[in-house]
Each structure stands twice: as C-alpha cells, then as structure tokens.
Image (cartoon, grey):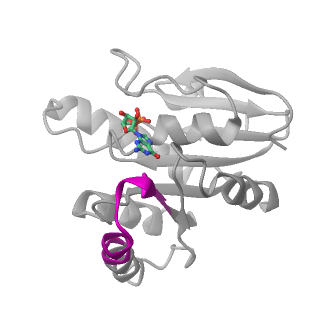
C-alpha cells in the first residue's frame, strides 16, 4: 500500500471542507510533540509529508493525505497545548466532535502515546470522545528508543489500565520508534489490513 503514492490532499478547518467519504480512512491523533509528524513521515516513507505540527497557522487543520487513491490518512491537530486560548480549543473540539461522529468511512484512530509517559488524562479525554463517537481506536507508543525496557513496561501498564476504561479501544498496543524504524512495518501492515 505504502509503496505507491502518498500525497497531501488538503487541510480542513470546517466540516464543509471535508473530502467526500468515498474511501476508508484512518486517523492519527496525539498530544502535541508526541512524535505524530515523525510517525506519519516514517509510515508513508516520505521525509516531510506531514508538516511539523507546530507550523504557525496550520495547527488547527485536519490534514488529509491520499494513499494510492485507496485510503485517506488523516492527521488530526495535536491536542493538549498548554497555552492555547480557550476559543481556539473550543473551536477545535467542536470540529473534532463533528468529524468523529460524521465520518462513516473512518475505520480506526491511532492514538499516539509517548513511551516515556504512558496515557495521560488528556489522552483519556480523547479516548472518551472516541468511545462516545463509537470510533475504534488503537494506541501506538512513540519514541520507544528513548526509554529503558523497565520504563517502557511502566508506560505500557499505565496505558493498558487506561484502555480497560474505554470500550472503543483495540486491545493491542503498537510499539514504534520513528527514529530507529521499529514497529513501522507492523503499523503499515495493520493499516493495510483494515477494510
Ligand atoms: P508532533 O508534534 O507530534 O508532530 O511531533 P514531531 O514528530 O514533530 O516530534 C517531536 C519531537 O520528538 C521532535 O524533536 C522529533 O525529532 C522527536 N521524535 C519524534 N519521534 C521520535 C522517535 O521515535 N525517537 C526519538 N528519539 N525522537 C523522536
């Protein structure tokens, strides 16, 4: 799937800007700085297809990429900005809710979790929203190269405990390092198997 073309289609700021639901889509979500751009770049095999998420002005867009005309890969804005103004946060939450509940072709959301921290309260807020929207999600640990095995186990335990509270969670957690390439082919295979 990812051997073929991956192209940036558009950045969406409102529901009426969404592309037609004419193919399945998978989505990437995570706290800002979790390593989402790096992971999307690694999975698609393109150096910089996902803009740095902190590019001014683009942080609140839902970015759509086409993968071989077969799949939309969707990059959600990073959440958990400490200093974002409330109106910005509220606008983003409204768009996110509308998007998640109004997209019949959305098959799975990958919720990225930093291997150093495990799932935090803000991650669980997104998981709860996904539960309410009845959208299946799967956790992906990022930056596993940055932690010792024992700390990775702790983050995994925290995250597994969180998942038990969320009925929309897919049980298997994917371990990745965009830096080292670990888990990238596994994630590609998971995406390719979704229909
Ligand atoms: P985003 O804000 O979620 O899109 O995060 P980025 O992809 O921009 O990454 C945030 C920071 O983490 C950058 O400095 C990356 O170089 C670094 N980073 C991302 N993925 C990895 C990884 O797998 N390993 C390591 N060591 N650093 C990473």
Check the image and report above or below for 116 versus 43: below
Residue 142: x and y, percent? 45, 53
In the rendered view of the protein, which quadrant contains the C terminus? bottom right
Task: Quadrant for residue 93, please give it.
Answer: top left
Is residue 62 left or right of 185 when viewed as pictured?
A: left
Residue at (58% x, 38% y) in the render:
40
Q: Residue furthest top?
A: 57
Q: 111 or 16: nearer the eye?
A: 111
Q: What predominant SS class does the magenta segment belong to?
A: helix
Residue at (55% x, 29% y) in the render:
63
Is residue 80 left or right of 30 when viewed as pictured?
A: left
Residue 23: x and y, percent? 80, 43
Q: Within the displayed image, which quadrant is ligand 1 positioned in?
A: top left
In the rendered view of the protein, which quadrant contains the N terminus? top right
Is residue 168 left or right of 89 when viewed as pictured?
A: right
Q: 115 or 24: nearer the eye?
A: 115
Residue at (61% x, 25% y) in the render:
47
Residue 193: x and y, percent? 81, 61
Task: Quadrant for residue 78, please give it.
Answer: top left
- Check if residue 91 falls in the magenta segment: no
Q: 177 or 106: nearer the eye?
A: 177
- Check if residue 152 falls in the magenta segment: yes
The magenta span reads 140-155
Can the viewer see residue 194?
yes
Can the viewer see residue 19?
no
Is residue 104 left or right of 129 when viewed as pictured?
A: right
């Amino acid at each position: 799937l990812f051997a073929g073309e991956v192209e940036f289609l558009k950045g969406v700021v409102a529901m009426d800007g969404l592309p037609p639901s004419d193919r399945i889509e998978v989505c990437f979500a995570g706290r800002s700085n979790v390593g989402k751009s790096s992971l999307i770049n690694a999975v698609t095999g393109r150096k910089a297809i996902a803009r740095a998420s902190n590019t001014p002005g683009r942080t609140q867009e839902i970015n759509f990429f086409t993968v071989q005309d077969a799949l939309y890969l969707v990059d959600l804005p990073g959440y958990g900005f400490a200093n974002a103004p409330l109106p910005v946060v509220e606008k983003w939450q409204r768009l996110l809710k509308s998007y998640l509940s109004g997209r019949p072709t959305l098959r799975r959301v990958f919720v990225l979790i930093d291997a150093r921290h495990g799932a935090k309260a803000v991650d669980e807020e997104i998981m709860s929203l996904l539960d309410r929207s009845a959208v299946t999600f799967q956790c992906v640990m990022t930056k596993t190269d940055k932690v010792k095995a024992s700390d990775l186990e702790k983050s995994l335990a925290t995250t597994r405990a969180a998942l038990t509270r969320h009925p929309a969670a897919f049980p298997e957690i994917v371990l990745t390092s965009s830096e080292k390439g670990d888990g990238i082919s596994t994630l590609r295979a998971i995406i390719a198997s979704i229909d």
